[in-house]
Image (cartoon, coloured by chain):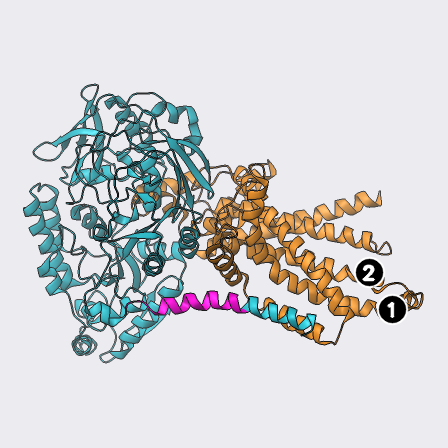
Chain colours: A orange, B cyan
Amino acid sequence: MSVLRRIAGRLVVLAAVLLAVSFLTFAMLNVLGGDPALAIVGADNADPETLDQVREELGLNDSFLEQYTSWVGGVLEGDLGRSYKTKQPVAEAIGERVPVTAQVGLLAIVLALVLAVPLAVWTAYRSGTKVDKGASVATFGLLSIPNFLLAYWLGYLVSVQLGWLPRSGWVRLSADPVGNLKTALLPALSLAIAEMAVYTRILRSDIIQTLQEDYLLLARAKGLSTRRILFAHALRPSTLSLMTVIGVQFGALIGGSIIVEQIFALPGMGSYLLNAIYERDYIVVQGVVLVIAASFVIVNFAVDIAYRLLDPRIKV
Amino acid sequence: MTPLRRRLLAMLAILAVLLSACGGDDDDGATGPGDDSQASGEGVREAEEDAPDEGEPQYGGSITIGLEAETNGWLPGTSQPANAGYVVYSAIYDPLVARVEDGSIQPYLAESFEPNEDYTRWSFTLRDGITFHDGTALTAEVIKRNWDEYLTVDGANTKGALEGITVEVTGPLTYDYVLDKGDAAFLDTLTTTPGFPFSVEAAAAAGEDAGSRPVGTGPFVFESWTRDGQLVVTRNEGYWRTDEKGNQLPYLDRITFRPITDEDTRLDSVASGDIDLMQTLRQSIVRRAREVVDGGGFNSYEWLGNNGGAGIINTMKPPFDDVRVRQALVYAVDQEQMIEVLGGTGITPPQTQWFTEDSPWYSEAAADAWIPYDPDKAQELLDSYINDPERSDGQPVGTPIRFTYDCPPDPSLVELSQAYQAFWQQVGLEVNLDSKEQSAHITQGIGTENDPFLRADYDVQCWRLGSEADPYSVWNSAFGPVETEVLNVSDYTHPDITAKLEEMRLEGDLEARKALVEEISLILAEEVPNFWTGGTATAIVAREGVKGILSPTTPDGQEIDGAANAIIRTPFLWLAQ
């Protein structure tokens, strides 16, 4: 019962967040300026009558609140609407693009963890040594490189100079799993490197703190191997902050994907959102933001659950 | 050396490689042709001069083309293709008419056309035996249904442009376009989406999805489309055209079009072999493409068209309603330095009018009349205005002129804005810079939310002006009535220009039209509703095995400029095995 109540509570939070986010997005788009009707008709073909007709047809002559409530009404009926510009149903377009963004994002997190966990454990164990200081310099350095710059560097080096991976484009997983991995690797790595640096910094600090615990001194005294102490006994209780950061960084990952998808020409949510903003395709922007906000809340809910799995003393 | 040190050195080595990759790019960018090459007259590398001897076309193979943008859909009436979209159009559709190298418009799907005396009726005859990809025939009735059911219906983006034009069928393959108002430049309209026939049967069957399932008469048949991902077409085995030697077109089996919006990524994708050819409309990329070509294995086909970088002036807003202030803005700026700021030195020449030297409409007299860089003259004109008790802005005598220059926040445009600001401040103008992203910038220039309608809402703005279309079409939009012409972004009208445009509307003789164009160009050089930042080069970049880029012709054998506007004409492409 209490689990159901907690889930219900989360759903209420989710609904409130989505409502607030969608309202703010709608308001910000209206403040931005630009004319969706002009974007739809095109400046070369625009004439006052056609522009007005398009505005009327799309409800753009209605007040801000009328437009917003009409959109919310559609969403409640399960209809995210059709793109002003392409006429494609927004839900269908999002469905096509989510796998691209999700796959790149997940791969980025996995790559970041695979690189960060051993590095964090090792530098925590060798805290204060030259290894630790060298890793600190490297992680701070990587953190300070914007991921779009990293994306260009990696693209130039790995694709143009070395010819190892494609510079642009996307192969669907169902069409060719190896080709898919090849197209996903560089974008994911561009996102993963900064994430890796963040994860390493957080996890290293927590492991250093954990290593001071009495039970680990006891483990050492009992003669357990260093590897076992670090990975079997110190790592797990040190990952709570890391989990929080993964949840919070999910937003940054989506932000980064908007740029990285452009740089690697991926047909994902990021490039879809960016083009929609440029073209003032409000209905698309609203739909994409809604999905991103929902996934952000859900991911953080999953992180809360993961806390409990990592430490049963915690109540979600 | 300890293992740790070795690892650290390895990390540093990787970082150094990454940094040199970036730095090398910057260095290369700084070592392009400088002032010397400009002085020696190096400009756009003419595609014709660079065309290799390509040999006999070969059949087969697949290529991937990188496009600068995605298009919203492929059904004329709702589709808004820019240069990138017309590359795909060239595969799926055929045009009724096409612009050839001398600038004239010639038949393509049409076998012939003939206007009546006052250009109110254009009689067309279609070629016989042409079918759409779904097997239905191209007939005059299809043209009429395209017109009535898709191009001129409410909500069609072509409706405004086609207002007052109807189609009358006169036979199975003959029909007339009937115009409310005669227009000698009417054929221009048919070089854009209304001139690309599509299967009405297929469009009707697809309903709302017609834009994503195009069916034309073109050399390739639509296979699939993932928006923002790729569009695939395959060879139309029953295509109606042959090349000049009677070989069946097209040569290729399959083409994949990939929108790659990031310019650097697109060029890198050609260089890395991900794609076979690409288009670009950015001169900074034209310059980078030269470096790729110089490295070997690639060709670049450059082209300089009429579309130029410009500044537009809000001529309805004081003090810019006074010609002295408008002229001073131009006298104060050294255009060659502005071109250098944009990275165009050695690629694009200064621009003096709406047409470049290669255009049939170019006027030497207008070029001579264009305002040169002369800050002293600018100062003199500004002093004259500022000290005029009747100055149009109503400010007290001696008050400096303050205004805002708007340009989108693209890095190169920010530099451009700062350069303009510096030049104008040297002659005492007080200039603020403002930046809005593209969509808001365009809306501000057009002024769609103002009262009266379409009155612009800026002082001075960067813009792009000019096209390959007939001067009447271009200028009728650019200098027609403010409240109806969306593209009159300078809000500028002039009785003499209006009168001469009216003459052009009904003037079919090319020389007489050229004379009128020159007269209007001279008025514009004096009245300055806009000024020029420089020409804009475009390029098609291809790996060496891709051939046929410069080979397009009409069915009657007239040559089409294959590099024009970086619109790749797919029917003629082939791969050297």
- Looking at the picture, how far across and down is residue B491, in whole percent? 24, 56
Report the magenta residues as a range: B16-33
What residue do we see at 23% from left, 50% from top?
A: B467
Name the residue at the front extreme. B1
Q: Who is closer to the viewer here, A253 or B318? A: A253
Q: Quadrant of residue B82?
A: top left
What residue do we see at 82% from left, 67% from top?
A: A210
- Looking at the picture, how far across and down is residue A188, in whole percent? 58, 53
Q: Chain of mark 2?
A: A
- Looking at the picture, how far across and down is residue B221, in whole percent? 37, 30
Instruction: Return the residue at label 2.
Output: A237
Up-down relation of residue B384 to residue A118 (above or below): below
Name the residue at the bottom extreme. B398
Could you tell me if the residues under marks 1 and 2 are in contact, i.e. CB atoms within 8 Å? yes
Q: Who is closer to the viewer here, B305 or A28? A: B305
Instruction: Return the residue at label 1.
Output: A213
Mark 1 crowdedness (10 Å alpha carbons): few <14, some 14-19, many ≥20 = few
Quadrant where the C terminus of chain B sits is top left
- Looking at the picture, how far across and down is residue B52, in whole percent? 25, 48
Quadrant where the N terminus of chain B sits is bottom right
In space, the residues marked 1 and 2 are separated at their CA atoms by: 11 Å
Q: Quadrant of residue A243?
A: bottom right
Label 1 vs 2, first from the N-terminus: 1
